[in-house]
Image (cartoon, rainbow, N blue to C red):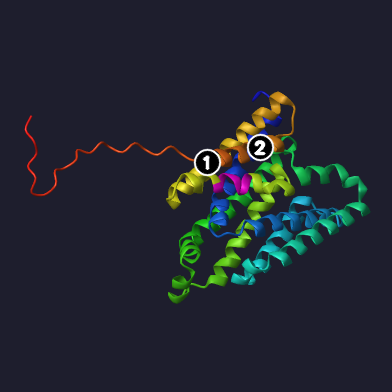
Amino acid sequence: MLDYDFMRTAFAAATVVAVVSGAVGYFLVLRGQTFAGHALAHVGFTGATGAVLVGIAPLWGLVLTTVAAGVGMGLMGERLAQRDVAIGLVLSLSLGLGLLFLHFYTAFATQATALLFGNVLAVDEGTVWTLAALGLVSLGALAVISRPLLFASLQPELAEAKGVSLRLYSVLFLAVVALATAECAQIVGVLLVFSLMVGPAATAQRLTSGVGKGILLSVALAVAVAWLGITLAFHTDWPSSFWITALSAGAYLLAMLPRPASPRPATIPHPAPGIAPRKG
């Protein structure tokens, strides 16, 4: 399998994207902003199709529009949680505009299908280097803001009282999410971003309570799901995006199963006060 150049390239690209999406996705789930992350992917589809119309590479249109939308959502601050309807309308409108742009440039139809559903086996070496550069920027930015972001996520009132700007870190974080979303779309497509960014992170939070361990587990699960999905796609000739999605959902469902309670050690009953124990 690894004798083929395109398979080695696919594994390299999937590894980069899985590491980024696992780390960013953990904070995304922790902050309860998964729907906003899903909306960013749909906005990116509009940017990618619009970029083709003006002669720009789809990846850069995807990056620019998702980052702009992420900053805009971040500026909404805490009001974002109460605006699911507005986000849903923007999501639908974005897909509609993307289809309109596609109508004007029908030669892009094949690439649009890959953008919607992903095709990691078609990623070239140049794209891998681009994804690696974007991944370093995303992880570096996340590392810088991780401590105040965690404080603002878990105890927002106390963080604001201590002088932490909730809006600033919301903007910065959603900009990082936008970059991660643009990368993730190259592997599983804009419609299936949930599978790689949210699935492993949600599974990790079900299995462990520590933040550090949770992030590491989320990254490990994302990498494992991506690698196993590509391997199964190679041997079955089924789409890799299907396998990645199925494995991600399966891992979460397994984590949801009730775990058997650990047996309690047997205790020897003590005699009541004032009653001497019987001697054999």
Q: Identify which residue is drawn at 88% across, 52% down.
A: 102
In the image, taking residue 48 as reference, residue 171 lies left or right, namely left
Quadrant position of the N terminus in the picture: top right
Q: Where is residue 143 in the image (x, y as percent from the top left)?
A: 50, 56
Under tag 1, what secondary structure? helix
Q: Position of residue 98 (x, y in %)?
A: 84, 55
In the image, taking residue 6 as reference, residue 155 lies left or right, namely left
Q: What's under tag 1, amino acid-wise?
A: Ala
The residue identified by callout 2 is 246
In the image, taking residue 233 as reference, residue 165 lies left or right, namely left
> Which residues are the magenta region?
196-202
Under tag 2, what secondary structure? helix
Separation (CA) of disc 2 from disc 1: 14 Å
Q: What's under tag 2, amino acid-wise?
A: Ala
Q: Identify which residue is drawn at 25% across, 36% down.
A: 266
Q: Position of residue 111 (x, y in %)?
A: 82, 44
Q: Where is residue 112 in the image (x, y as percent from the top left)?
A: 82, 46
In the image, taking residue 160 as reference, residue 108 lies left or right, namely right
Q: Name the main secondary structure of what is drawn in magenta.
A: helix
Residue 122 position by quadrant = top right
Q: Identify which residue is drawn at 34% across, 36% down.
A: 263
- Residue 255 image label: 1
